[in-house]
Amino acid sequence: MSDGVNATALHDGVNTSSLYDRVNAYYDYSGYYDGVENATTPCDNANLVNFSQLFLPTLYSLVFVLGFIGNGLVLCVLMKHRNQTNLTDMCLFNLALADLIFVLTLPFYSHFSVVGEWTFGDFMCHFASGTHNTGFFSSIFFMVAMTLDRYMVIMHAHKVARYRTMRSGIALTVVVWMLSFCISLPDIIFTKVVNESTRLTCEYSPENDYWRTYNTFTINVLGLVFPLLVMIVCYSRIIPILMKMKSAKKHRVAKLILLIVIAFFLFWVPYNISLFLWFLMSKGLLSNGCSIGANLRLSITVTETLAYTHCCLNPIIYAFVGQKFMKRAVLLLRKYVPVVLLPSNRGLSDSSYRKSSVVSRSTEVNAIM
């Protein structure tokens, strides 16, 4: 097995270490020696390895920088105005925190893809895999929570107002983080440092095929199908109600909703389709020739990075499009980064956009969007 193969395979998935075991099957030459598929030589993956070693570190670094800045700014703004926090702000804070935790693991995998060896030890192998997956699922679940919150506020404004308290937000936060951690627990347990030939790799080594199927289920069903269905069902009912409201912002809010769904679909569906096709190939339901395998691996590598960039867009989609949040962000940047060319402070104080406490559908729409 040539150098760099495992380095590339380790990075081809939402759960980088978990997907290693699935994609690494492509580099298992036992079929060649056993005469399977009438193979005469092992698959030549040199071009794919070289491409991944250049492509992954570059894109991972870009996602890390943009995701760190964007989500870090969201956290700073919300922390500065924590006394005015509501349930929506708590969800937004945790979404940014989940995305930040997610991108903080990328430098480890970027380094691995360049060096070709895991140099951070067994603890960091477990830790990186666990935080990577926990951050990923937490980000998905908090997007779902924000969708359901918007649905309840708009469809049942007067009934749910008294339940949207700080205590409810804290309870929701604990439940989501614990759920995400529990889902990621098998990856934390089974991911470990393995001595592969002359170098160390951080691999997902489950005890049986059940856990491989489990990973496929969690990534595709909990990571894509479930949140996408929730968004489509909830927002398809919200938009008609918005159109009936006497609000000048209803068209802007409707466009924002469509942007949320379309962005999630475009960024995640190609990646999950690639993973699912690889799963079918690993089960022998698709041809596993060298050409098909190489194309699928290339597809996974490219669509993976595209999917990861969604965490860079979350601050823009969920935070910066809101006028209140944008004003707060501008004020914060002007205070701590005076060299940045930003609009004047005039009219940007919190008092200029404080809203009445009267609960109605239109005011709630402005508050949560």
Image: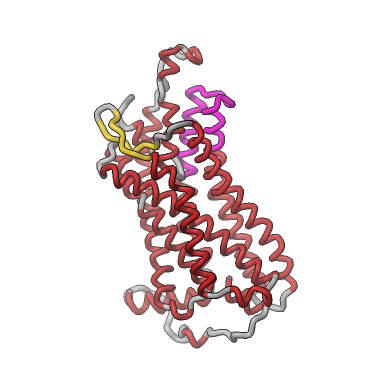
Span highlighted in magenta in the image: 276-304
Q: For this rendering, which residue is in front, 268 or 343?
A: 268
Q: Position of residue 71 (x, y in %)?
A: 42, 63
Q: Is residue 330 above or below residue 240?
A: below
Residue 337 x %, y %: 33, 74
Residue at screen point 26% across, 32% down: 199
Coloration of the structure image: secondary structure
Q: Residue at x 49, y 28 (%)?
A: 293
Q: Is residue 279 magenta?
A: yes
**Magenta stretch contains residue 216:** no
Residue 130: give x, y in percent of width and height.
Answer: 39, 48
What main secondary structure does the magenta stretch of the protein show? helix
**Residue 2 sits above or below residue 271 on the image:** above
Q: Count up the numbered dots.
A: 0
Q: Position of residue 323 (x, y in %)?
A: 53, 75
- Would residue 77 be found to the left or right of residue 281 on screen? left
| Nearest to the observer: residue 225 or residue 192 | 192
Q: Is residue 220 above or below residue 297?
A: below
Image quarter (top left, top right, bottom left or bottom right) of the N terminus: top left
Residue 322 falls left or right of residue 73: right
Residue drawn 47% across the image and 62% down it: 174
Quadrant holding the C terminus: bottom right
